[in-house]
Amino acid sequence: MADDSYSPLVVGEFGDPKEVSGRLPSSGPELSAFRVELEPETLSSLLRLSLNSGLASSVQSLHAWHRQPNLFPVPLRRALALKMPIRALDEWAAGRTQSLPLSALKGAVIGIDASHYIHQHLHHHTTREPLLIALGGFPFALKGNIERELQIFKNLGIALVFVFNGLDWGKRDQRPQVQAESARAFDQAWELYDQQQADQVVDAFSSAGTLKPEALYRFLQRILHQNGVDFLVAPYSAAAQLSYLAKGPHQLVDAIFGSSEILLYDVDKLITRIDMEPSQFYWITRQACQDELGRLTNDQFVDFALLLGSRYLRTFPLFENPAYPGKTMNIRDALGMFNAAGRSGVALCSQFEEDRRVQDLQYMDRFKRASMTVKHHVFTDIDGKVGSIDPDYAPSDMHELIGQRLPEELYFYLSKGVLGPDVPNYLTSGEVLVSLPLGAEDSEIYRHLVGDLLTPLRTQAICLLSNSLHRFYQTKVINVRTWFDEKSDRSVNLKTLPSIKETIQSWKINSEQFPEGVKKLQAPQGSFKFAVESLKDQDFVSKSFAGKDAPVLSSQGDILANVFWRFLQLRGYVDEKHQLTEWGTCLEQALSVLDPADSLEEHTFIAIELLRMGILSSKDWFSHVSGGPMRGSDEDKTFNTLVSRVACIGKLRHKSIGYSGPLSRQLLYYRSLISAVRETLRDLIEVVLAGLLLSGDADRDRKDWTEMSVKLPFIDDNDCGLGIAVRTYLDDLPHHPEPTAPEARAEVKAKGKEWFQHSDSFTGNLDTAFKLFSAVYKGTQNAGKDFREKKFWEDANKWLADRV
């Protein structure tokens, strides 16, 4: 029996949103910004047109910086404890930087390592949202913080080029590993929450971990595009690409802002931190680092930095503190071991080759691979060609170090964000590594989803992309490796699969061919609503099969419309005769009740996908953890579970400040199921767009590559905040003698301001969630005969109608 005195434990940030998120000063007098215009045809025009004569003057503007003496060492207030690529070197170098006013960079072009930039936002004490890992999704204040910073750079006349990591490189672990230390900290944080230890919960979750920067790549790319800031996705390492932009034959950036990993390359000076308040930047020279470490040569410095641990190579086992596994020993002690081995990484590995830890990791082989990868690093040059820094001396087996080569056109689409790295990685590496993200439970339902239910979608994406590539890729066997099954290797044999490309290639319809009824549809071409409603017009359906001589698609709207039709056919909403299937009718009916102003189309589509997979239900998957309904009858709890799970697909509308409010471990675990589906759908629809372009079905002489990418759905990850709001509201109603009375509903809704202090509107959020439920309910009542839960959804809808 639930305790009627129960009230949700509210934790989080309670300060003024303006105060918490306002570490950036207000913009000063607006200056003329030096904006980099990236042209899309090739990387050559992309970069040359942007920098031209402005480069010389921007270099001169940095003379003061270049003339600064090496003031060693300089005490430094730590802004954050970095755990980025070269962890030990990052922390050591942080105390040896010099600083200058940010205004010294006026007129310069700064190349920014996007991962480092995101990492600083996720970890800086003024921008970190400690409950993010307990809520899921993206930080509420991140977009506002980034946009304020971009405006400050613009006002100071500083141009920016963000560079993102691209494809994976190097030898990966055979099996994905669960991060045991983070998982333990995560469990302990939940134990504190369940014990009502509100004063300790926030710090506990903050220490348990946060998002990986890669999870926010598309999110940041969209912000940059919307604010007119250019970005480039490197073919592989962002550090290697930034090195070329700064040190290549055509200097394209004046300075680099990133982690110490960039010092592995031939970069003289590195900006390690930028503080908007008090408008300072901190930088370090590679030569000063080498001198401080005993006058290491360039090659010795690279060896030592690699041994300390980076994205290229894990820390040398003997450098790790035996009392705290995973933590590097003092850098001076590590340097002593390195010096004793003749300042050679190979010699140090040989000296301890009998050590079990070194043998288990095959560390010598991995070190040599990492060293060669840095020495012969790959980048995109000013002419858009992808190659090694020294092609005449690069080893013939570079594919063993970096990965299998892809067509130049595909690297270009990667560089513009048209296609993410996931599916190309599957093809080049020959494996799909399925890991357990922090915040997801290692449960049977999660294993079933990512190991079984999502495999057909991944297979479609891999097969479709391979159909447009060399036959070498069309005959590969892709192994699927999961964290939970050490013995079984599932595989996708592309040689035995029929071409997917041919089944959807008839979708190549120009808007000039649309009948009047389709032209009058009140929905944008690049939307699910337009795609399914257009197929209700049988006149259009009969004319929607493009012949081989059909003209290429040119307008952005036409391209996106055909991407959506192709995607819906792959997902089974449209058949090969271009007719809506039973699930297509279900989707069309669900979308028909939506108000475009509520922006729920994408969420509704995901809900229908979850229905098809048997994931959107009230099944008792997570009852062993806290956060479920506690009050009312069994029926009340069952329907509350269903409605709050539907709400989890949506997003809590919240002010630009870290979350404060109740938490739910059950809904967080359910949210991870939604997130896994969303990520897989995004990969698939990106491949549909890339495949259309690779096949020559669209005009490729264009400038809107990134705009098309950001208009595709499934960028925004969902949090479980909206689900918590719905569950809390519905769970409090049974506390009243008449739970469905208008007075009871009004009283509970009034409490929402106390439970969710920074919510835009508690009642507004509830309304959004209930509209989403209504759309999904409409779809269930129009699903095919194979869907056997219509009556259950009908009962749930009646139950909810009395409580809205």
Image: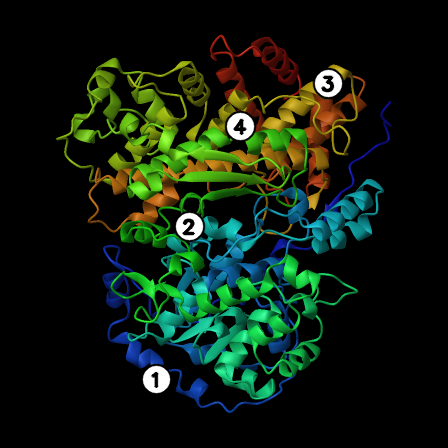
Query: Which quadrant is home to the C terminus?
Result: top right
Q: Is residue 638 visible?
A: yes
Front residue of 232 and 147: 232
Amino acid at dot 1 = Gln
Residue 668 image point, x, y percent: 66, 37
Q: Which three-letter amino acid code belongs to the residue tagged 2?
A: Arg
Q: Residues within 10 Å of mark 3 (few under 14, many from 20)?
A: some
> Is 317 situated left or right of 34 in this image?
right
Q: Are marks 1 and 2 in contact (CB under 8 Å)?
A: no
Q: CA distance from mark 4 to mark 3?
A: 30 Å
Of callouts 2 and 4, which one flags the residue occurring earlier in the amino acid sequence?
2
Q: Nearer the viewer, residue 536 or 622?
A: 622
Q: Residues within 10 Å of mark 2 (few under 14, many from 20)?
A: some
Which of the two labelled residues, at mark 4 and mark 3, occupies the earlier sequence position? 4
Where, by quadrant of the figure, is residue 507 drawn? top left
Q: Position of residue 38 (x, y in %)?
A: 29, 60
Q: Is disc 3 in contact with disc 1, using a CB cutoff of under 8 Å?
A: no
Q: Earlier in the sequence, mark 3 or mark 1?
A: 1
Few, some or many C-alpha atoms within 10 Å of disc 4 (few <14, some 14-19, many ≥20)? some
The answer to which quarter of the image holds residue 329 is bottom right
* Front disc: 4 or 3: 4
How far apart are the alpha carbons under marks 4 and 1?
58 Å
Front residue of this view, candidates 680 and 345: 345
| Residue 504 on image: x %, y % | 29, 27
Mark 1–mark 2 distance (CA, rounded to whole Å): 32 Å
**Residue indicated by mark 4:** 453
Q: Secondary structure at mark 2?
A: helix
Q: Give the residue type that dot 4 points to.
A: Leu
- Mark 3–mark 1 distance (CA, rounded to whole Å): 70 Å
Question: Which residue position is annotated with label 3?
Answer: 636
Q: What residue would you read off at disc 2?
A: 222
